[in-house]
Amino acid sequence: VALGLTVRRHSLHFLRQPNQEVPSTIAMTSVLVLKSPKSPTLEALACHLTVAASGAKVKTVTAPGAKLTLFINGVQLTDCVGICRAICACGAANSPMMDPKKLSAKAPKAASVDSIVECCLQAFDAIRAQKSATKGDSKTKEAYERAVGVLNQLAATMAKNTKGIGGTQGLTLADIFVLTAAYPMFADQKRKPDPKVAQIAAWTKKIIAEQKWVSAVKASPGDIDLSVAPSPAAGAAAAGRAAASRNKKGAKKERDVSWMPIVPPGHTRYSWPMGKKKAAAGGAGGKKAAYSKTPAVPDPAEWKDIEAKAKADSSKPKLPIPGAKNILITSALPYVNNVPHLGNIIGCVLSADVYSRYCRLRGYNSVYVCGTDEYGTTTEMKAYQEGLTNQQICDKYHAIHKEIYQWFNIGFDHFGRTTTQQQTEIAQDIYKRARANGFVVEKETQQLYDTKLNKFLADRYVEGTCPKCGYEKARGDQCDKCGSIDYTPVELKNPVSVLTKNTPEVRGSKHLYLDLPKLKDRLWSFVEDSQKKGRWTGNASSETDSWINKRGLLPRCITRDLKWGTPVPEKGYEDKVFYVWFDAPIGYISITATYTPEWEKWWKNETKDVRLVQFMGKDNIPFHTVIFPCTLLAASNPESPKDNFVLLDSISVCDYLQYEGGLKFSKSRGTGVFGNNAKETGIAAPIWRYYLLSVRPENQDSEFDWQKLHDACRGELIGNFGNFINRTLSFLGKMGGVVPPAKLLPKDREFFRKVSALVDQYVDLMEKIAMRDALRLVLEVSRLGNGLFQHEAPWDLMKKGDGERTASVLAIAVQLVWVLAALCKPFMPSVATEICRQLAVPEATLFFPGSDTKSGFKCQYGPPSKTWSEAKAKGGLFVGHKIGKAKPLFARIEQKMLDQWRKKYGGVGSVTTGELLFPFYMLVAEIKEIDPHPTAAHLAVLKVDLGPGKGSKTLVSGIGDKYPDLKAALLGAKVLVIENVQPSNFKGVKTSALLLCAETPSGKRAIELPRETPAGIICLPKGSKLNKNKFPSKQFGKSPMTIGADGIVTFANRNIEGAKGAKLPTIPSNFRGKIVI
């Protein structure tokens, strides 16, 4: 009965909307059932059982557009109405309760069994149309009269032979078809039936009052209305409108899917084609194995509740939960005076965002705060340059930063700023506590004063020679070469004002100092304890140890002669503010205070159940592991735990990300991709996130490379990750889009053991904040999925009629799609969102419960979850779930665009100066002596003349075994060398220069110039300055030069020329490609 009701629903729908194409879900399922039936859909099962009972010959053809062409007993059927009629026709031919001879007098084309069913359908539709028929509609009345006769005769036959449901004879499918067709008209007790059909009405009401009938009605999906259909006239009008719409040139055909019994999620029941063996077993006997019901999936209303709750929870400030895993996450506060570049983004905010999202995925109670660092000299000078006030410049760049981070999908819990009242109050309170505890001292200090500006110069606006390493461009606050920050600007040799190029004079000024030596023991105790309990990157540990135990701690100045900053609450310091590196880290606390007024629960956690995890670049290490902890220790009271601040638990420090060719990102020189540039390329944010995280400089400096970005997108995201997800969901969509049950074989269980092991490794790496390796495991999981799909070949399984194995493979694959959505969520959140949309699951159900080393990941193949909350707790998808529509996740990057981007972002130089940073001091030299290396045959020791007045150099090169006769080939040759190399030993021989080589048809060779070329010509790109700063030879490969087809050497897409008008000849044609040493 339930089957019959479902069939009738479909026939009613198509009677209301004539000439409609058969939807692919019905068509495809019916084809599959007839080929290999197993637990089919309701309407397809009706087809199968009837055909099996009647012994009719069945032929199926799948036409373009997934339409179904079905032949039963030679009759072509192309819609659901036809299928329903075929059910009844076949049933009637084998039914002892329906005698075609008794009906033939009233039915057209009496010889055709199918015409009996046609007459029945017309009869019921005529009765429905009677009330809406217009006066004088003779055809409707005629059809009605004829229908009444047919139905009364049919009712008499059934009443005579049937004793109700469960009687000795029972009901055939044909009888049920009549009952279910009549049911909508006679089930309404308030409606009085037409006396002319009283007999069938009485018979119908008797049957539908039976308890088994009532139960069957309840078991039937109720998502299609059984109400009265429109009149034939209305139907004809609708058909005319549909035809007119189709005939319009270029008109797009609309497909109505309101009829579907499967509506995701909440109104669906699972069905899947049976395998050949079970189909044969079912046969005409109709064994129970043919079909089994699955409880309905969770209510979609609860889905909305889960998403709404997740959204509401994210909008409310979170507070620590006693006994829970509470994690406070920060990333270094970006300066507000510029646009962040890719190195800034991966080094701080993006890395912290990935960890924050991972914590949410695991169910940890975490908060991620960040904001712009807005006080200090850099802000004052930027405002001066742009003609704005300090506050205006802060507002402008705060908005720029916020917009860029939003585009990169950085999910802060709160993104604030340091120019707030909370910052003033908290910074001043910390200072007062530190002073009261005896950790602040006053000292007279010597500072550099610019007489042209009539002001003391901030440290970063003084340049000179570093007192530690001799670097000539060291700033007053830090040397970019050796990283030293423990000197004062006065200690620089040959200091110059960056602003006026004036030589500043030394003047005295009183300042306040944080007494770091007095805090050394408490600081070191904290460091040892934190490194033991938390996770510190190697560079953070070594740099901190060097600061404390090797260099030794010195009192640190915490005030400056500026106007723009947090005021110092001391008499006599009205014209001074707190130094940015005392003030800025306190911004973490004040930004938390703008997030929640109960900020002290995060930063003064008496129960010590809050972990502080911080992310930054390597130039910020000592400020977060020495100065900021000392500041908080100085303000804390060991005797009063409630007044103590939360200190660093774990620190993740990135090395530098350099631009292509080993160049530093520089806005003034136009070198590198900045946050706004990334958006301008048209490359989607998830692709940028993926690539930056895949080259995250975790253990050493790494380099951005356009070609590698392209290859990562094409090979890893599209070819691996995206390919698996798209092929799985597309294939499942063609099979009806419902998650099937899986009969797991031993090899399937082994497959999931591998997946589970990878997920556990992923969890372990993410707990260790080893993001790059964890990301690789995500790709490894999708690679396993592709291997499964390719090896099992579900398309071949379908051709062989093995529906059961096909179902199992797709069940495993779609489960893996859910796993990948969860795994990729921290790295590519918008991609995870899109996968959830395609899976038709709430994103809030992506969840990995478990311990720090176990994911809690489970495969869900048991009974469906009753609620989405239950589904979230179990993890994964469940049998019977209806997925959404598949679509590609990523767009390709065009190869032709790479050179355009290289040219645009590769260092075109400053708009005003056209300067380009060229790291080498490169010259033409003449080889004067050649000797074999004393211990290594593949090396040669060369002495080269660098030209008039430049002296000579001894170098070691790996060309000792590259020539048949090295001396004969190169003695007296003019070659290219790099002179500004830090001296080093090559197997016992000191070398202080590099010989440039290239690959030739004969192998690696020294680059030779015509012998008449003068030695001493300096070679550098046009517009760049001469650079004699020493660098280690191992850094050479990070700044590649190439020889083009025209024989010209290029660097960063710019030609290298002879300096001061000297002509540099082109390189001979046998040397081409990348230059090596």
Image: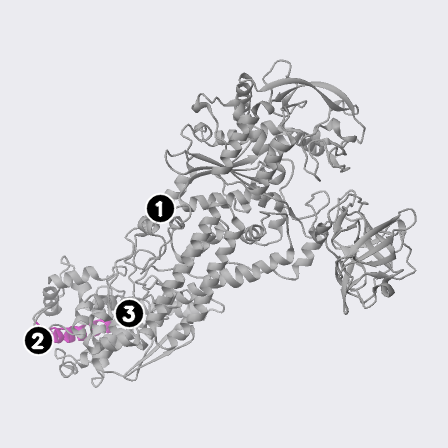
Residue 636 at what x, y percent from top left? 50, 23
Which mark sits nearer the N-terminus, 3 or 1? 3
Residue 171 at what x, y percent from top left? 13, 72
**Which region of the structure is painted magenta?**
138-162
- 97 relative to 1016 in the view: left or right: left
Q: Are marks 3 and 1 in contact (CB under 8 Å)?
A: no
The quarter of the rendered structure image containing the N terminus is bottom left
Q: Nearer the viewer, residue 95 or 752?
A: 752
Helix, strand or loop at label 2? It is helix
Crowding around mark 2 (Cα neighbors within 10 Å: few <14, some 14 to 19, many 20+) is: some
Q: For the residues marked 3 and 1, what is the alpha-carbon distance in whole angstroms?
A: 32 Å
Crowding around mark 3 (Cα neighbors within 10 Å: few <14, some 14 to 19, many 20+) is: many
Can you identify the residue that label 1 sits on? 306
Above or below residue 981? Residue 96 is: below
Name the kind of residue labelled 2 in the image.
Answer: Asn
* Count of numbered circles on the image: 3
Instruction: State yes or no: residue 234 in magenta.
Output: no
Q: Nearer the viewer, residue 519 or 722?
A: 519
Picture disc at residue 40: 3
Q: Are marks 2 and 3 in contact (CB under 8 Å)?
A: no
Q: Which residue is at 90% across, 52% downward? A: 1062
Can you identify the residue that label 2 sits on? 161
